Image (spheres, rainbow, N blue to C red):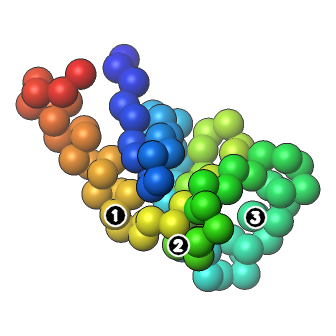
Amino acid sequence: MSIKLINIGFGNIVSANRIISIVGPESAPIKRLMQDARDRGTLVDATYGRRTRAVIITDSDHVILSAVQPETVAHRVTDKEDLIEEGQGK
């Protein structure tokens, strides 16, 4: 199994293999999830002080905040997988 890395903005990289979900931060359940992660010490804020646009949930129970739109992050994940499948990436 190869490691796929995804840019989530400002030079921050996340392992695509560990991503469970990419969601927007607007709903109350996601806001609670973010606060719970902050309290547990598993919140990673990669927004550099900008508005949170995507919340990335990983299989290690970490919650990562990104200033990039969820659709953009998801597109980067699928683009990377397409390159791997075609044998063009590593």
Identify the residue position indicated by label 3 in the image.
Answer: 33
Q: Is residue 50 left or right of residue 17?
A: right
Q: Earlier in the sequence, mark 2 or mark 1?
A: 2
The C terminus sits in image quarter: top left
Could you give the CA–CA distance between mark 2 and mark 3, rounded to whole angstroms? Answer: 15 Å
Which quadrant of the structure image shows residue 70? bottom left
Q: Which residue is mark 2?
A: 53
Q: Which residue is mark 1?
A: 72
What amino acid does circle 3 point to?
Answer: Leu
Where in the figure is residue 74, as x and y percent of width and height? Answer: 36, 57
Circles 2, 1 touching at the beta carbon (< 8 Å): no
Q: Which numbered disc flags the more N-terminal residue, 3 or 1?
A: 3
| Residue 31 place in picture, x, y as percent | 73, 74
Point out the image quarter for the N terminus. Answer: top left
Element type at marker 2? Answer: loop
Q: Nearer the viewer, mark 2 or mark 3?
A: 2
In screen coordinates, is 38 left or right of 30? right
Residue 36, image x, y percentages? 84, 60
Between disc 2 and disc 3, whose residue precedes?
A: 3
Residue found at the very far right of the displayed protein: 39
Q: Image point 22% across, 47% down: which residue?
A: 79
Can residue 79 be seen at all in this image of the molecule? yes
| Residue drawn at point x = 62 percent, y = 39 percent | 59
Q: Residue at x 82, y 65 (%)?
A: 35
Asked if marks 2 and 3 touch (Cβ < 8 Å), the reply is: no
